Amino acid sequence: MSQVVEHSEAHRGAFSSRKVFILAAIGSAVGLGNIWRFPYVAYENGGGAFVIPYLVALLTAGLPFLLLDYGLGHRYRGSAPLSFRRTHRSAEGLGWWQVGICFVIAVYYAAVIAWAGRYALFSLDKSWGDDPEGFLFGSYLQAGDPGISLDFVSGVTIPLVLVWVAVLAIMALGVQKGIGAASVVFIPVLFVAFIALVVVALTLDGASTGLDALFTPDWGALGETSVWIAAYGQIFFSLSVGFGIMITYASYVGRRSDMTGSGLVVGFANSGFELLAGIGVFAALGFMATAAGVGVDEVATDGLGLAFIAFPAIINEAPAGALIGVLFFGSLVVAGVTSLVSVIEVVISAVRDKFEMSRVGASMAVGVPAAVISITLLGTTTGVYVLDIIDHFINRFGILLVAVVSMLALSWVFRRTGLLREHLNRDGSVRVGRWWEWLIGVFAPAALTFILANEFIDNLREPYEGYPTWMLATLGWGLAAAVLLLGFVAARLPWRDTTFLGDPEIQAREEERTN
Amino acid sequence: MSTSAIVMMLIAMLVLWGGLAVSIWNISRYQGEEPEAVQRDL
């Protein structure tokens, strides 16, 4: 291995093997959305027929975009800002924009993990009683009117502090001993726990009713644009592409690793887990509907409602309810932590590269402010509203927007997709053809732009969930715009003289020739 | 469950879990080059 790359890896850290990288990438991709978003999206958009647009979206946008991120991080061997900077001097702002988005996501994502952790314990004695909804918003979150208060809720704050302590410990341990080691343990545990949950759910009365509702195809749905939008949206948000995570992780893999083959494993593992989640969740919802004597359509839901209202109701009624609760909420915690670790690593890695800070120093410099903001904003009686607004806007006008802009910029402004295709093919077990450049440069951006435009119009027409205008203007539109602006301001800060800003691959080849 | 639901469930399993199995089999054939030493980030 060349001296430049060797020197870089000694400082930045690296995964010990391709297997560890794949597990870490799966840990990032498999998150809360796989468990609580996919089943309902599939059910609402054609049931069994949704498989077709979902697969088309996976093959034409999800996997191609994943390979773009892999190619970028693996070729340029840096955090998102450094990788973009090495493609072109003017591209660095895109990386910092992604870093800003990740910081924002980390702040609120930790809160959901804290709630799930608390609910795993609540499951043991069914603390929510007969009214899970009233318990969630009343006794547990103590949610008041929308706004920003500083009335802390100890039941949220204490687990939130514990989540941040655990995550910062993982981050401080580094790429292999922290992120890699955690992934090697957590991902198998997650898969085993969730398979156990699915097996238990399938034994419940009415499970087949739920599966029937999920998989009965509505072929007419394939003619609806909204169904295709839902498929592309699900694939995009599920794979953790477009906001720096996969760029960062790919920069920690051996220089001659097979990135295309690894990408296929990560993509299919992520979608395979979603299918597993769909089976487990709808088997449980089928039981709930049968027990209540209503149709599945009356109990089917997603997001917070599914996790913290529907599942407690299921746990109340089901035999071995406590076991289901621990497996379900435990899976949410594990899936959430491995995703949170990947999100915050994007920020830490960028700070390390730019300021040449130590691993522990950068972890604390990033993690402590993130934890303080997270606890201050999310640990209070208004945390649930803050979370809802930030999540809604940063996903659409942060992640989606930066993904479209970066794909178009790399394809048409900086013209790097040909180089990245060659790079992926050099050691890739699956060849990437010229069609990949068209998917990345034309098709995928067009599909995502269509989704983005729809979202933009919808959010302008109707204030999201009727929240106060000032909250939407600051935590929604304002925060999404601030992240963009700050990203391009950060790009103007100078790099250290010792930071190599050229193409490390060219440097490595020259050194190999010299030696 | 209706026949159409069972068929679509099996197709989804075959494609997604089968795709995962094939992609794992593919990379297991191709070792590539692994790092020579575990790097400790400084």
Image (spheres, rainbow, N blue to C red):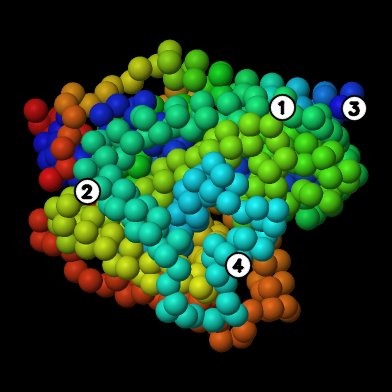
**Amino acid residing under circle 1:** Leu
Give me the C-alpha separation between circle 3 and circle 2. Answer: 52 Å
x 53%, y 48%: residue: A122
Residue that carries the numbered disc 1 in the rendered image: A202
Marks 1 and 3: same chain?
no
Please, is residue A186 above or below residue A447 in the view? above
Q: In this view, does A294 lie above or below A305?
A: above
Q: Which of A242 and A298 is in front in this view?
A: A298
Amino acid type at mark 2: Ala
Q: Do the residues labelled 3 and 2 touch (CB within 8 Å)?
A: no
- As drawn, is A4 to the left or to the right of A291? left
Q: Position of residue A495 (x, y in %)?
A: 18, 63
Pointer 4: what residue? A138
User: Residue B36 at what x, y percent from top left?
Assistant: 18, 24
Mark 4 surroundings: few (<14), some (14-19) or many (≥20) residues within 10 A: few
Q: Seen in the image, is A316 located left or right of residue A24?
A: right
